[in-house]
Image (spheres, grey):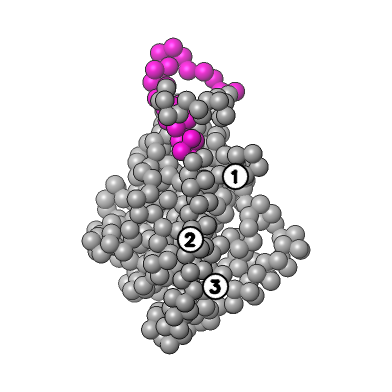
Amino acid sequence: MDSRCAESVRFLGPPLAGREQPQEGQQQQQTQGTDSWFCFQVRRRRRAAARAAVTVSFLCHVCVSLKELLLEKQRIDSGDCFALLRGGRVVAAAAADDRVVAAAAAAERGVAAAAADESFGWSGFDLGTLPPHSALRKGTEDFSDVPIFDAQNVPEHVKTDPSWAEKPFILRGDASLAALQKDFGRSVLLQTANLGNLSIRVVPSWSLLRGGGDEPHLLALSDYIEHLDLYEGDTRLEPAYAIDPSYKIPGLPDSQVIDTFIRAWNRSHFENPASRIIFLGGAESGVGWHRHGAAVQMTIHGRKRWFLYPRGTSLSPLWVGLSIADWLNSIYPSLPAESLPLEFIQKSGDVVYIPDGWYHAVINLADTLAVSIQSFSFEPAEAAQDDT
């Protein structure tokens, strides 16, 4: 066992307790994966402490830089920064304090909802276990600033008008995704992982896009599923997110299932099967601000909250390296109404289209399994420079 990880045996105990032990012929094959799990948890705990230090440092930086922030707000007010055009006109969103009041009122009324696919879940969708600012906007858990169409009856004008290639939208209630839910429940996924000895790439959500952040760590898929939530006493450690551009989980959708009208807009973008990425994570895991080529994301299980800015938007450098959870805590409440992002909730069975070059960030509101087919053709040199 790796000497760096020996300490983990003492405080973590056997992560595979209660599971069938490997046969003698499998012992050597699985030892390395088990050691990797120990290593990952040790590093995860160390990162939790490091993250707290980074948060304190960030807050101190915000206090010291108050003058700069006020100057930035003046530039926004004077029109030097972006204004979101929604349907050809600027739409002012509710003020942050109004959202807080509404969220508190909703919480007092006992607002709670269960995901339609509870059978998948480790935790499902429960507003009582999520911070109100994560799951609610203006007191509701269902909202969308982008058009929603019936996936079984997409309007002809959407199919035939290529200008929709530059607009985000949701196709709700895709029957093919609903049919996959029973094939990718938690127990079925665990069985598939064990039979195929599958592994998956995992990274802490907060460092996913951080310059110099942690490299993805290869873990046994079954270990990741069984230990998705890890606690240090009563403190839940930062969520880890599995993001893997691999084909090791059979039966998941690929680029061939994308609606023909979307493929017609971006034919060269969605032909490469290597662009398929699997996302598997628990509540409050997610991805901070980034951009790439056009993308179609299909959610089989779970619920996601998306934040979008149109192509050409310049984001504040203060946002770089923040996890989406930290951004929601420290930045989002102070944004002026005219600078708020477009937002929507993606539910299980939804197909989301994100245009080429749009900045976006995502937080999972429940245990989520999704597949993204995305293009990497968007100005790669510029994107790499902006997103580091």
Q: Residues within 10 Å of mark 3 (few under 14, many from 20)?
A: few
Rendered view: 170 above or below 202: below
Q: In the current view of this chain or complex, which residue is farthest to the front? A: 64
Residue linked to disc 3 = 334
Mark 1 element type: strand
Task: From the image, state whether disc 2 or disc 1 is nearer to you.
Answer: 2
Viewer-closest of 283 and 174: 283
Q: Nearer the viewer, residue 44 or 376?
A: 44
Q: Are marks 2 and 1 in contact (CB under 8 Å)?
A: no
Q: Is residue 257 visible?
A: no
SS state under label 2: helix
- Name which residue lies at 69% across and 54% down: 128
Q: Residues within 10 Å of mark 2 (few under 14, many from 20)?
A: some
The furthest residue to the top: 24
Percent of width and height locating residue 89? 46, 85
Identify the residue under disc 2. 58
Which-is-in-front pick, marks 3 and 2? 2
Q: Amino acid at mark 3?
A: Ser
Q: Which residues are magenta?
A: 18-44
- Residue lying furthest right in this view? 109
Q: Which residue is mark 1?
A: 236
Categorize mark 1 by other alpha carbons within 10 Å: few (<14), some (14-19), many (20+).
Answer: few
Image quarter (top left, top right, bottom left or bottom right) of the C terminus: bottom left
Q: Which of the two discs, 2 and 1, labels the residue nearer the N terminus?
A: 2
